[in-house]
Amino acid sequence: MKQVAAGLAILALSAISACSPYVFSPEISGFATGVTSLASSYQTGRQAVSSISEQERQAAYAAARKRLLLLPGCDQRDPSGTPPKFADCAIVSFGDTGAPAPTAAEQALADAAPAFNALKAYADALEAVSKAADEKTLSTATQSLATAAGSLAGAVAKLDPAAKEAGAAIGPLTGVLGKGIAIYLDQRRYEALRATVPGVDPAVQILGRTVTAALLDIRAHQLGHLEQQMSAQAEPLEMASVARLTARDYQEKLTALTATVAAFNLARAADPSQAAASMVAAHARLATALRDGTGEDAAVLEAIGGFVAAAEKVNTATHAAAGAPAEEPHAPQAGAS
Amino acid sequence: MATIDPNLVASAGIDQLQSAINVLNALKHGQNPDIQAIDAKILALEDKQTALRDQVLRQIEDSPENQTAIAQMNSAAAALKSAADEMTADATALSEAAAVVSAAASLITALAPFI
């Protein structure tokens, strides 16, 4: 009886394993990591563009020796009103009554936030599904259930020795039950992904354009700023009068220019349009694999790998041009949105 | 009908501006060039390149397709989040069931001597 039960359990396990759908967990984690990198590039780049605007404003003030004023909000320490808030504290041209309005570029970049937020929320939700009740949590739960069922069978066998044979079969059968629950959840994961990812693919393509436009705009502003620096630093060295510079002055100017040239080369090496195109292509591959039920597919993993690498390159370049270290992109926790 | 990606149109325009910048840069290698004047012209063209990028971003953001795509993505994210929450709740229920069975086993074991 015991051997028969164990044999049945092994047979059932084999049959169930064959039915387990592939739920693309590593691919989805990779996609979320790539999207996190692009969102980080956007955040840092947006701050960098604001910083460039501020520097240009200050340069304009300095060039014109403009008369300035601190806004009255600079005398306010605590928020007031309903809802409580601070009045602006900023340096403005004499006679101005409010903080400088954002430039057209700053405003356009700020308005790109909903697109990046939507992509990030989607990628996080995909990962939440692929990791919901993950293998470890589920295995702990089913193990507890198996142990509890075993204890129950043992207690019953003490009361009725005739039930001992049946109790011996419970161990392997609870194993089958645990595996069955894991597969059931994988099936649900798969269905949730299949019902959503292919349908959303056209939207990902559209938002790919927004991501491209925003990151190219950031790149253009960062490169433009570096070009202005390079141009100003190179000018004395390009003049015919360069020989009149002292050796020390010449060396200092050359060192400063070399550093800016290096920063410029690093910043322009990354191509945001390629990163966004990789994102769209990777998602399209994932959508096709889910729609066609192809299961694990090397082409999907390869596409995701290409996307992660391209996004990381853009992230590093954006941070370098902004003079900030790139953050390590980390996959969001399961259940996060 | 095939849609045109404004990013590609802008890139073509930026390439044309770059050709003009390249011509100006070549002038720097001539006899006694006015470097400051050439640099000023180059910077002006580079500003136009950046302005083109600003303009394209604004155009794409304001398009109805972009707004619809954002709404679709947010809706998909909400549906996926809800599915993930349900699955997590099921795993929790499984743990709770194990606790109940375990308690029943303990009770039977404790009562066994009296039965």
Image (tube, rainbow, N blue to C red):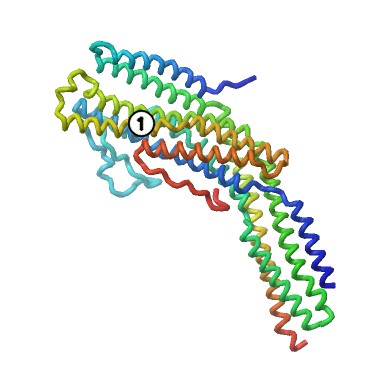
Residue named by callout 1? A264
**Residue at the (66%, 38%) spot, across then down:** A287
The quarter of the image holding the N terminus of chain B is: top right
Q: Position of residue A39 (x, y in %)?
A: 48, 40
Q: Is residue A118 visible?
A: no
The quarter of the image holding the C terminus of chain B is: bottom right
B62 lies left or right of B23? right
A124 lies left or right of B54? right
Residue A234 image-quadrant placement:
top left
Q: Is residue A300 visible?
A: yes
Q: Position of residue B89 (x, y in %)?
A: 64, 58
Q: Is residue A64 above or below residue B81?
A: above
Q: Is residue A304 above or below residue A53?
A: below
Residue A317 image-quadrant placement:
top left
Q: Is residue A46 above or below residue B64?
A: below
Q: Hey, what amino acid is under mark 1?
A: Phe
Residue lying at the far top of the rendered structure: B31
Q: Nearer the viewer, residue A336 or B19?
A: B19
Chain of the residue that carries numbered disc 1 in the rendered image: A
**Residue at the (67%, 49%) spot, across then down:** A189
Residue lying at the far bottom of the rendered structure: B114
A96 lies left or right of A6? left
Provide the secondary structure element on which disc 1 rests.
helix
